[in-house]
Image (cartoon, rainbow, N blue to C red):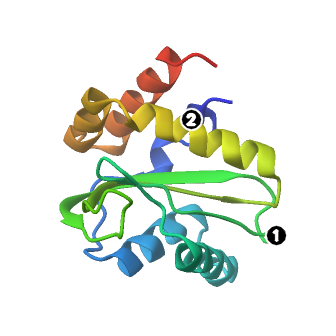
Amino acid sequence: MHVSQLISPTRVRVPLEARDKPGVLRELVALLVDGDSRQADVLGAILERERQFPTGVGYGVAVPHAKTPVLPTLGLVAGTTRDPVDYEAIDGMPVRIFFLLAGPDEAGPHVRAISRISRIVRQEPVRAQLLAAATPDAFYRVLCEADCTLAP
Protein backbone atom coordinates (compact mmCIF):
# COMPACT_ATOMS: atom_id res chain seq x y z
CA MET A 1 0.00 0.00 0.00
CA HIS A 2 1.28 3.41 -0.94
CA VAL A 3 0.35 6.39 1.22
CA SER A 4 -0.17 8.38 -1.96
CA GLN A 5 -3.20 6.16 -2.69
CA LEU A 6 -4.92 7.37 0.48
CA ILE A 7 -4.44 11.11 0.09
CA SER A 8 -4.85 13.86 -2.49
CA PRO A 9 -4.01 17.57 -2.54
CA THR A 10 -7.60 18.31 -1.44
CA ARG A 11 -6.83 16.42 1.76
CA VAL A 12 -3.79 18.54 2.63
CA ARG A 13 -3.83 21.86 4.47
CA VAL A 14 -0.69 23.99 4.29
CA PRO A 15 -0.59 25.70 6.69
CA LEU A 16 -3.01 24.55 9.33
CA GLU A 17 -4.54 27.48 11.19
CA ALA A 18 -4.69 25.84 14.63
CA ARG A 19 -1.93 26.58 17.12
CA ASP A 20 -2.49 23.82 19.70
CA LYS A 21 -2.98 20.06 19.72
CA PRO A 22 -6.77 20.02 20.20
CA GLY A 23 -7.21 22.63 17.48
CA VAL A 24 -4.97 20.77 15.03
CA LEU A 25 -6.89 17.54 15.63
CA ARG A 26 -10.26 19.29 15.08
CA GLU A 27 -9.00 20.96 11.90
CA LEU A 28 -7.64 17.70 10.48
CA VAL A 29 -10.82 15.77 11.30
CA ALA A 30 -12.87 18.48 9.57
CA LEU A 31 -10.63 18.05 6.53
CA LEU A 32 -11.19 14.27 6.59
CA VAL A 33 -14.95 14.29 7.22
CA ASP A 34 -16.96 17.00 5.52
CA GLY A 35 -19.29 18.85 7.91
CA ASP A 36 -21.54 16.05 9.05
CA SER A 37 -22.31 14.28 12.30
CA ARG A 38 -19.47 11.81 11.76
CA GLN A 39 -16.94 14.54 12.64
CA ALA A 40 -17.77 14.28 16.35
CA ASP A 41 -17.47 10.48 16.27
CA VAL A 42 -14.13 10.55 14.45
CA LEU A 43 -12.75 13.30 16.70
CA GLY A 44 -13.87 11.34 19.77
CA ALA A 45 -12.07 8.23 18.53
CA ILE A 46 -8.90 10.24 17.80
CA LEU A 47 -8.98 11.92 21.23
CA GLU A 48 -9.53 8.58 22.97
CA ARG A 49 -6.51 7.12 21.16
CA GLU A 50 -4.44 10.17 22.17
CA ARG A 51 -5.45 9.67 25.83
CA GLN A 52 -4.19 6.09 25.66
CA PHE A 53 -0.86 6.97 24.05
CA PRO A 54 0.08 10.22 22.28
CA THR A 55 0.91 9.74 18.61
CA GLY A 56 3.84 12.13 18.23
CA VAL A 57 6.33 9.81 16.52
CA GLY A 58 9.33 12.12 16.81
CA TYR A 59 11.24 14.23 14.31
CA GLY A 60 8.56 16.95 14.61
CA VAL A 61 5.89 14.60 13.23
CA ALA A 62 2.61 13.29 14.64
CA VAL A 63 0.38 10.59 13.19
CA PRO A 64 -2.89 10.75 15.13
CA HIS A 65 -5.03 7.77 14.20
CA ALA A 66 -8.08 5.82 15.24
CA LYS A 67 -10.38 3.03 14.19
CA THR A 68 -14.03 3.96 13.94
CA PRO A 69 -17.06 2.24 12.42
CA VAL A 70 -18.46 5.55 11.12
CA LEU A 71 -15.94 5.61 8.26
CA PRO A 72 -16.41 2.96 5.56
CA THR A 73 -12.83 3.21 4.26
CA LEU A 74 -9.43 4.24 5.53
CA GLY A 75 -8.82 7.95 5.08
CA LEU A 76 -5.73 10.12 5.41
CA VAL A 77 -5.28 13.88 5.67
CA ALA A 78 -2.15 15.91 6.35
CA GLY A 79 -0.88 19.36 7.08
CA THR A 80 1.87 21.50 8.49
CA THR A 81 1.85 24.36 10.97
CA ARG A 82 3.83 27.59 10.80
CA ASP A 83 4.84 27.31 14.44
CA PRO A 84 5.68 24.15 16.40
CA VAL A 85 2.85 22.62 18.44
CA ASP A 86 3.43 21.04 21.86
CA TYR A 87 2.26 17.48 21.26
CA GLU A 88 3.72 15.14 23.90
CA ALA A 89 5.84 13.43 21.23
CA ILE A 90 8.02 10.48 22.21
CA ASP A 91 11.17 12.56 21.72
CA GLY A 92 9.74 15.51 23.67
CA MET A 93 10.00 17.80 20.65
CA PRO A 94 7.14 19.93 19.32
CA VAL A 95 5.41 18.98 16.06
CA ARG A 96 4.88 20.78 12.74
CA ILE A 97 4.01 17.91 10.37
CA PHE A 98 0.74 16.04 10.88
CA PHE A 99 -0.82 12.99 9.23
CA LEU A 100 -4.26 11.98 10.55
CA LEU A 101 -5.52 8.51 9.68
CA ALA A 102 -8.92 7.03 10.49
CA GLY A 103 -11.06 4.23 9.20
CA PRO A 104 -12.88 1.00 10.00
CA ASP A 105 -11.59 -1.58 12.44
CA GLU A 106 -9.31 -3.36 9.98
CA ALA A 107 -5.88 -3.65 11.54
CA GLY A 108 -3.88 -4.58 8.42
CA PRO A 109 -4.32 -1.48 6.23
CA HIS A 110 -4.21 0.81 9.25
CA VAL A 111 -0.90 -0.59 10.52
CA ARG A 112 0.66 -0.66 7.04
CA ALA A 113 -0.25 3.00 6.45
CA ILE A 114 1.20 4.13 9.79
CA SER A 115 4.36 2.12 9.16
CA ARG A 116 4.78 3.60 5.69
CA ILE A 117 4.25 7.17 6.92
CA SER A 118 6.81 6.58 9.66
CA ARG A 119 9.36 5.30 7.14
CA ILE A 120 8.80 8.30 4.88
CA VAL A 121 9.19 10.94 7.61
CA ARG A 122 12.32 9.37 9.07
CA GLN A 123 14.15 10.95 6.15
CA GLU A 124 15.26 14.46 7.15
CA PRO A 125 15.31 15.81 3.57
CA VAL A 126 11.70 14.71 3.11
CA ARG A 127 10.63 16.41 6.34
CA ALA A 128 12.38 19.60 5.25
CA GLN A 129 10.65 19.50 1.85
CA LEU A 130 7.25 18.86 3.43
CA LEU A 131 7.73 21.85 5.73
CA ALA A 132 8.87 24.00 2.81
CA ALA A 133 5.83 23.10 0.70
CA ALA A 134 3.83 26.29 0.21
CA THR A 135 0.77 24.60 -1.30
CA PRO A 136 -1.17 21.36 -0.87
CA ASP A 137 -0.05 20.32 -4.37
CA ALA A 138 3.61 20.82 -3.45
CA PHE A 139 3.20 18.83 -0.19
CA TYR A 140 1.46 16.05 -2.11
CA ARG A 141 4.20 15.90 -4.75
CA VAL A 142 6.93 15.61 -2.09
CA LEU A 143 4.96 12.89 -0.31
CA CYS A 144 4.36 10.94 -3.53
CA GLU A 145 8.00 11.12 -4.57
CA ALA A 146 9.17 9.92 -1.15
CA ASP A 147 6.51 7.19 -1.09
CA CYS A 148 7.50 5.90 -4.54
CA THR A 149 11.19 5.62 -3.62
CA LEU A 150 10.48 3.27 -0.68
CA ALA A 151 10.43 -0.46 -1.19
CA PRO A 152 6.88 -1.86 -0.99
Q: Nearer the viewer, residue 92 or 77?
A: 92
Q: Quadrant of the N terminus?
A: top right
Q: Nearer the viewer, mark 1 or mark 2?
A: 2
Looking at the rendered structure, the secondary structure element under dot 2 is helix
Q: Where's residue 113, x and y in %? A: 63, 41
Three-letter code for the amino acid on which mark 1 is drawn? Pro
Mark 1 or mark 2, earlier in chain: 1
Looking at the rendered structure, the secondary structure element under dot 1 is loop
12 displayed left or right of 45: left
Quickly name the residue at label 1: 69
Q: Residue at x 63, y 34 (%)?
A: 5
146 displayed left or right of 77: left
Quickly name the residue at label 2: 116
Mark 1 surroundings within 10 Å by alpha-carbon count, few (fewer than 14), some (14 through 19), many (20 or more) = some
111 displayed left or right of 46: right
Q: Where's residue 15, x and y in %? A: 27, 57
Q: Where's residue 87, x and y in %? A: 34, 69
Q: Nearer the viewer, residue 37 or 42?
A: 42
User: To which quarter of the image does residue 34 belong?
Assistant: bottom right
User: To which quarter of the image does residue 86 belong?
Assistant: bottom left
Give the Cα separation between the discs numbered 1 and 2. 23 Å
Three-letter code for the amino acid on which mark 2 is drawn? Arg
127 displayed left or right of 149: left
